[in-house]
Image: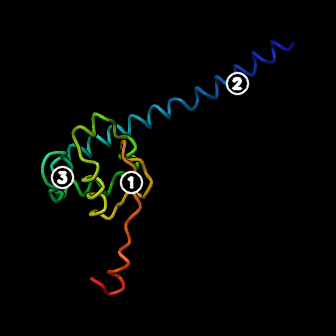
Amino acid sequence: MMSMKVSFQLLVFTMIFMMFEPQKVWGESEYYREKEIFKLKCMKTITIVGDYVHPSQSCVSVVKKYDMVRICRSLTPKDESEISVIKLLHLSRECQMPVPARTMCGTYEVPKPLHHHCLSQGHP
């Protein structure tokens, strides 16, 4: 009787797991596709080589369309060898789609913004 109960619980667990697994796999492939399109459209701006280049209109459109937090979280070490996370974060701010502080962007944790108290009090 006890082994039948355990077998039934295992069967239920397996069925529940199988119901959710395809969504997870689909979601990860969707993130990958978005990340690759983002990289393609914005590479001139986010490349690790050279200075920051203001984004093209197609790059801005992609940044506004995709979830930049998801893009950040999906960055791999290989991605980070090709793109600058600092430039990516600058781009997201420039497009009014900033990545929140403490978000992991690849291996980089987005810092809290600095507050310039002296500037707000009229000091140089």
Say which of marks 3 and 1 sits in front. 1
Marking on residue 45 = 3
Which image quadrant for residue 111?
A: bottom left
Question: Which residue in the protein does label 1 denote?
Answer: 110
Which image quadrant for residue 35?
A: top left
* Label 2, residues with CA under 10 Å away: few <14, some 14-19, many ≥20: few
Give the mark nearest the N terminus, 2 or 1.
Answer: 2
**What's the residue type where badge 3 is placed?**
Thr
Label 3 sits on a secondary structure element that is helix
Q: Nearer the viewer, residue 39 or 17?
A: 39
Question: Which residue in the protein does label 2 denote?
Answer: 12
Q: How many marks?
A: 3
Give the mark nearest the N terminus, 3 or 2.
Answer: 2
Marking on residue 22 = none
Q: Position of residue 103 (x, y in %)?
A: 43, 51
Q: Position of residue 20 (x, y in %)?
A: 56, 32
- Which residue is located at x 87 percent, y 12 percent? 1
